[in-house]
Amino acid sequence: MNTAAKKKILIVDDEPDIIKYLTTYLEDNGYDVISAVDGREGFQKAKDERPDLITLDITMPEESGVRMYRNLNDSEELNHIPIVIITGVSKMFERFLETRKQVDPPEAYFEKPIDRDKLLEKVKELLA
């Protein structure tokens, strides 16, 4: 049994099915998982829980993933956490993010439906 602390992943998505799917999959692969349903709750949980990685949906009611992404980037205490964008939005959004000068691009980007094997590979790589 591995005695090292489990890596903690924060899933931020407004779709309960996605949260459940990713939580089960990531927990089955040895990660601790916490979740939030919008950017405001996600940012608060990031501050409280200090996850090792965040998966972030972009289109959510209340507070969008874009705002949370900006808030994380602007936060001295949180801007080191790798962010994996998971969204139903097209490649245009990826290009849009990459052209913003005020924020760093995310560590990875996945479109829904998610290729879970590629996602797990990227998560392992980012948390290595």
Image (cartoon, rainbow, N blue to C red):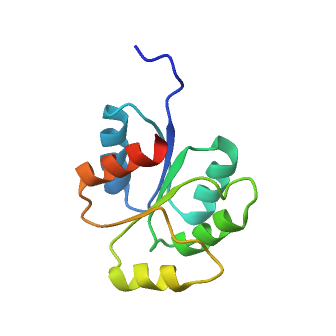
Residue 95 image point, x, y percent:
42, 83
Residue 57 image point, x, y percent:
44, 65
> Which image quarter is the N terminus in?
top left
Residue 82 image point, x, y percent:
53, 55
**Residue in the image at 62% along x and 63% along y:** 40
Residue 34 in sight from this viewpoint: no
Q: Identify whether 67 is placed above or below 79.
A: below
Within the image, what quadrant is residue 113 found in?
bottom left
Nearest the eye: 100 or 11 = 100
**Residue in the image at 41% along x and 78% along y:** 94
Q: Does 118 sit left or right of 30 as displayed?
A: left
**Residue in the image at 68% along x and 54% along y:** 78
**Residue in the image at 24% along x and 49% along y:** 117
Nearest the eye: 106 or 72 = 106
Residue 4 in sight from this viewpoint: yes
Q: Does 68 sit left or right of 58 as displayed?
A: right
Q: Does 56 sit left or right of 110 as displayed?
A: right
Residue 22 image point, x, y percent:
34, 48
Q: Does 32 sit left or right of 117 as displayed?
A: right
